Image: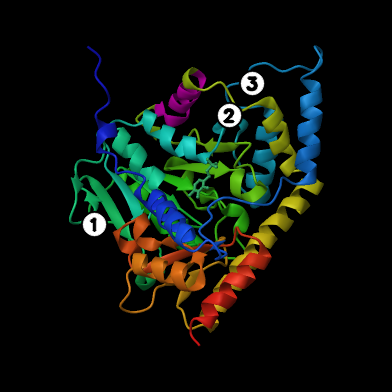
Amino acid sequence: MFKINENYLKLRGSYLFSTIAKKVAAYQEAHPDKELIRLGIGDVTLPLAPAVIDSLHKAVDEMASAETFHGYAPDLGYEFLRKAIADNDYKARGVEIALDEIFVSDGAKSDSGNIGDIFSQDNKIAVCDPVYPVYVDTNVMAGRTGTFLEDEEKWSNVIYMPCTAENNFVPELPKETPDIIYLCYPNNPTGSTITKAQLQEWVDYANKVKAVIIYDAAYEAYISEEDVPHTIYECEGAKTCAIELRSFSKNAGFTGTRLGFTVIPKELKQGDVMLNSLWARRHGTKFNGAPYIIQRAGEAVYSEAGKKQTAEQVAYYMNNAKTIREGLSEAGYKVSGGVNAPYVWLQVPEGMTSWEFFDYLLENANVVGTPGSGFGPSGEGYFRLTGFGTYENTVKAIERIKALNK
Ligand SMILES: *Cc1c(COP(=O)(O)O)cnc(C)c1O
């Protein structure tokens, strides 16, 4: 008789977004005349850039001829793409990453989940609180998280690192020593970031305690300030302790086409075993590559035209984020984020919970956002709005929120 992976039964339901969807649907049904504005969006909304579309068309045409047809992609990804990544994302920032340290994939979500395959079940993970839920859920599936403590809303075997206004949303080094540390900067959901000096402390700590940092840099393209690292490998010693996840989703709108990559330096070892070799083996066995067509589209992101066009898209979202941040600030809210990330994180008014503020905003301004408590216990009292809507709707939503004060 077969047995299932019982860890899946421990998973918490996708409580956050299903609850939001239900509340929004119920409100709209009761008030069909109200026009709702959704600023809870965690997905891009602009179409793919023209340079990307051209490249897609060209690659599709190549598939129609026997001379230029492509079957299975190489395990690590096509060299044309890995070269573009190494040159533009790393060499241009003074970091040498070899082509066989780059693994092209179908996105950072799969990689952040799958990377757990190369680590034993007996690893203690540390996550920021609030957190991108994928890090915790995939470790629940792997059986690393212990039992769920209902009253604390925490897993017994996970180290939670609170990120609140008090520490500027960057965690302190944990008291208990973790084996695997998840960091995501610029951060989803708080929109905050980390300075190079702060990240260096984490790298030094990880090397000292022999932990691995899984660094999610999906929002790298949104960085606008000087002192913010674009890659963890800007920090000295990062190659012996860090794995970096990247995505084409948020910088170039590939959420629907799917493309990302993971960097594992060959210096990153346990004893004489390179994690790079384990991941290469995992990739070769369980993954048959991102499509040729999509890898060509990814290459186009690094062309002159592609860089310019995708930078314009990022600027559009960041202008929305700025509109939200400044508008809410004027309305008297305490806000953070929205400078190096498309997310604005606001403190809900005194005396309200995140969910109460969600209802208040839905009913009084017809604006939909995301309650901070849905991302972890330390998110209580906070609320996330995103710059991924249209400019017109963003302006309208902020006007409505401002009008609540009158
Ligand atoms: C959107 C997002 C990603 C990107 O995932 P893809 O699978 O590449 O689309 C990764 N990490 C975080 C924190 C995100 O918000």
Q: Secondary structure at mark 2?
A: helix
* CA–CA distance in space, label 2 to label 1: 36 Å
Report the amino acid beneath label 1.
Lys
Say above or below: 188 vs 224: above
Is 327 situated left or right of 207 in this image? Answer: right
Q: Report if the beta carbon of the residue with label 1 is closer than 8 angstroms to ligand 1.
A: no
Task: Tell me the kind of residue under disc 3.
Answer: Ala
Which residue is pictured at 64% across the width and 50% down the height? Answer: 251
The answer to whether mark 2 is within 8 Å of ligand 1 is: no
Q: Quadrant of residue 291?
A: top right
Q: CA distance from mark 3 to mark 1?
A: 44 Å
Viewer-side residue, 253 vs 195: 253
The amino acid at mark 2 is Asp
Residue 175 circle label: 1
Q: Mark 3–mark 1 contact, CB under 8 Å?
A: no
Give the prevailing secondary structure in the magenta stretch.
helix
Q: Position of residue 145 (x, y in %)?
A: 25, 41
Q: Earlier in the sequence, mark 2 or mark 1?
A: 2
SS category of the residue bearing label 1? loop
Of the image marks 3 and 1, the number of the one nearer the N terminus: 3
Q: Is residue 225 in view from this perspective?
A: no
Which residue is denoted by mark 2 in the rendering? 100
Q: Secondary structure at mark 3?
A: loop
User: Is residue 51 depicted above or below 276 in this figure?
Assistant: below
State left or right for residue 404 relative to residue 98: left
Q: How is the image coloured?
A: rainbow
Question: Is residue 274 a member of the stretch shown in magenta?
Answer: yes
Residue at 24%, 19% in the rendered image: 3
> Image quadrant of residue 299?
top right
Q: Which residue is mark 3?
A: 73
Q: CA–CA distance between discs 2 and 3?
A: 15 Å
